[in-house]
Every structure is written in structure tokens, then in C-alpha cells.
Image: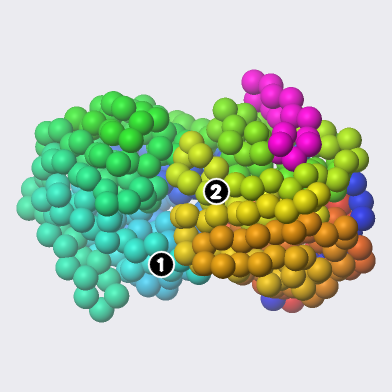
Amino acid sequence: MDKFIIRGGNVLNGTVRISGAKNAVLPLLAATILTDEPMTIGNVPNLKDVNTLIKLISGLGVTIDYQGDTVKVDTSTLDNQFAPYELVKTMRASILVLGPLLARYGEAKVSLPGGCAIGSRPVDQHLKALEALGAEIEVEAGYVHAKVNGRLKGGEVVFDMVTVGGTENILMAAVLAEGTTIIRNAAREPEITDLAHLLIKMGAKIEGLDTDTLTVTGVEQLHGCAYNVVADRIETGSYLAAAVITGGKIRTTHTDPNLLESVLEKFEEMGAEVTRGEDWIELDMQGKRPKAVSFRTLPHPEFPTDMQAQLMAINVLGRGFATISETIFENRFMHVPELCRMGANIQVEGHDAVVTGVEKLQGAPVMATDLRASFSLVIAALAAEGETVMERIYHIDRGYENVEAKLRTLGADIQRVKG
């Protein structure tokens, strides 16, 4: 298994180009199932999760040409509606093919998903929403078997909790339903708005973008189009975090500062000078030690759970102490023991972590536990004294494109060792 060897102590400086968003490209690829006309998705990041979903969709009989950062999809060859456990088990987002398959073909059989072990993240909200549109659903032997007689029927969907994947699934299903669907307590993440923009370009009728109530007027069919994936706000924040923790200066390009305002405000509170452009963000820490800041993760537009681990790593070396409250996932402090191996002072009680800043970290053997935790360990290692050996880095490959190459251009001493 591959691992990273990281030698800390270098101040990161330079410019890094941000890739397309992992959390946006996966539903966009699933949405191509909704039409039998050719689709082209651009600005696609080369990630493990992307390749897994492409393999899953190809297994449905879809013809896919993936070259560079462009994916061309022809679903006219789709000949089955079955997504097997062997592919779905590695990635929770695989459940996103359920809504499009059901809406277009009237039937789908998809394995219950897997993915990062950061919480239960049940799919019951997805299934309840599809049932509200007339779907008949059975869960048996680890598979969701959904079918509908004719077209789905528009209806009212009220989510019991904010769910990004559930909102995406029902949004894709509703665009081909007969009549009007109202989705209440919808998630408001930028990746959902990106999906809505793609669907509208394909001919869908959706109102209420960026709000918690979406109104979808179903159409009989959608057409093909070309579309570029939105910038990855979490990758953007992660590289800016690397500048904060090492006292450096980094400019991220091909990104959108409007998608990350809650995080940028925390960086400024830590003492960073943040400059925003139309499609770039520059952060300058001017060699200063960051100030520890408290925060609470909440659904967008509040502070994102996907940046919690990275800011915790900064707080570990911050001046003072901070309280971090994780309200989205119940098991998202798995990076804490690994940071403590490097000398961090963190006390966890339930959903809260109290971080007392230390003067320095020491390189140590650590293990990645999930996608975002893996980046927090990387930046902690970059700021630590000595050498850190990081195992199980396949987690970071799920969501960060060419991570060690990008970090090296910023001055990091990091190398991948093949296992």
C-alpha cells in the first residue's frame, strides 16, 4: 500500500491550480443517465472516486470516453439498471445512480453503499423521498430494488434532516417526473446548485436555487449538453490551510471565493491576510503563528464539515485554545489520535473537541482514517519537526488530484512511496 514520507519545516509559497469539485462531479456524472443524447463533462478531476463511478456507469452499458479532464458519455447503449456491491461498496456516492435510473427506466437495483467510516449516513432519506414520488422500494440482501409503473409522479418531499446526497438523488428523479415536485429542507451546498445548473441546461425546470425549497416541474425528456464542473471549494480551503499552518503565502487559482466565505473568515480570524479575486484567492500568513479559533460545523452556508479536520490541525499549533463542535457526522474526530501522536493536545468529549495549542509538533508514524482527515495529517506533518510516515493514503486519492505534485510546487518535501 502506498504511503507518504513528509519532512516538515518548509514554509509553503506559490500558486496552485484548483481542480473540479469531487463532490460536484459525481452527481453530474450520474445525471448523464437522464438523457439518451451525448453529454460532455469538462474540468473533471482525476480521482479514485471519479474512476469508480465511471466504472459503475460503464457497467450499466454506457459508453464513456475519459481523456484528460473531459468525460464524454453516450447512454444510448445503456442496457441494464443494476449497480453491484463490488463497485458500490467503496463509495457512498454510488447511490446517486438510483434516482436517474428509476426516473428514466422505471426500475433500478443498486447495492447499499460504502465509503468513508465517518458516520452512519443512512440512505433512508433517499428512499423515503423516492417513495413520495410513487416509487415502490424493497431493500433485500443488501440491495435497493426500486420500480415505478410508468413515470414518477410529482409530489412533496420533506427531508427529516439536511442531506446533500438525498437532495441530489430526488432532484435528478423529479426532473423527469410527471407534474410538480416540491423539495423542502433541501441541502444548499454549491455542488447541488451546480447539479441544478447542469439539469437546467439539459432542459429541466427548477426554481429556488440556493434555497432550502426547490420546485421542480417535470419534463418528458432531457437533451444532451456540454458542462464544466465547478471549482472544488474544499480543495481550495485545504491548500490555503497549508499556508496558514506553515506561515506561508499561497494563491489558489481557477476557484470561486464566494463558495468558501465561512472558511476564509476563520482564516482571517487566525491572523491571515486574505485577498479575494474573481477566480482566485490569495492567503498570506507573513510567517506568523496562527491564533486558535473556535467553530461549529453546520450545513452550507455555515462552516463545512469537510474543513473541520484541516482547521483542527491548524489549531493544534495555534496560540491559545479553541473548541470545535462537529454537528454533521458523529464519528469525525478519528484524526485526533493521529494528531496526538505528533504532540497535539486535544481533548474530545462527545461531539466537541477542545484543542490547546502547542509550540511544535514532532514527525511520527500516522495513519489516514478518511478523506479529509488525511489532508489534516499532511499539513500537520508539513509544519512538524522531522519526518512523518503516513500510511493508508488511498483515502487522500479519493478527493485530491495530484496532491503531492501540487504540494511540491509550493515547496513541500513530500514523496509517495509505492507499497
Q: Quadrant of the C terminus?
A: bottom right
Q: Is residue 414 above or below residue 38?
A: below
Q: Quadrant of the N terminus?
A: bottom right
Q: Is residue 89 above or below residue 302?
A: below
Marks 2 and 1, how far apart at CA: 20 Å
Q: Is residue 225 visible?
A: no
Q: Secondary structure at mark 1?
A: loop
Q: Earlier in the sequence, mark 2 or mark 1?
A: 1
Image x and y of residue 392, in percent:
67, 72
Which residue in the protein does label 2 denote? Answer: 296
Amino acid tagged 2: Arg
Q: Looking at the image, which is closer to me, 196 or 261?
A: 261
The boundaries of the magenta stretch are 267-281
Label 2 crowd bin: few (<14), some (14–19), many (20+), radius 10 Å: some
Viewer-nearest of labels 2 and 1? 2
Image x and y of residue 145, in percent:
21, 65
Identity of the residue drawn at 14% across and 47% down? 133
Identity of the residue drawn at 83% across and 37% down? 285
Identity of the residue drawn at 35% across and 53% down? 96
Q: Looking at the image, which is closer to me, 64 or 368?
A: 368
Q: Quadrant of residue 202?
A: top left
Image x and y of residue 214, in percent:
28, 33
Q: Residue furthest bottom?
A: 141
Which residue in the protein does label 1 denote? Answer: 120
